[in-house]
Image: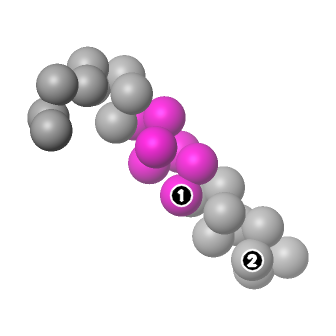
Amino acid sequence: MKTYPRNHGNIIVQMKKLKKNLARV
């Protein structure tokens, strides 16, 4: 299911990064 636009993928990547940062803190 790769029908999402690139922006949607970027949002998911940003959310993953935020989760990693939150876990760090």
Q: Which residues are magenta?
A: 10-16
Specify the quadrant that holds the N terminus: top left
Q: Say whether residue 11 is left or right of residue 10.
A: right
Between 13 and 1, the one nearer to me in the picture: 1
Where is residue 22? Give x, y as percent. Answer: 78, 67
**Which residue is found at the position 25% from the left and 25% from the top?**
4
Specify the quadrant that holds the C terminus: bottom right
Q: CA distance from mark 1 to mark 2?
A: 11 Å
On whether residue 17 falls in the magenta region, the answer is no
- The residue sitting at the left extreme is 2
On whether residue 13 falls in the magenta region, the answer is yes
Looking at the rendered structure, the secondary structure element under dot 1 is helix
What color scheme is it? one colour
Looking at the rendered structure, the secondary structure element under dot 2 is helix
Question: Which residue carries the number 1 mark?
Answer: 16
Where is residue 18? Give x, y as percent. Answer: 66, 55
Q: Say whether residue 10 is left or right of residue 5.
A: right
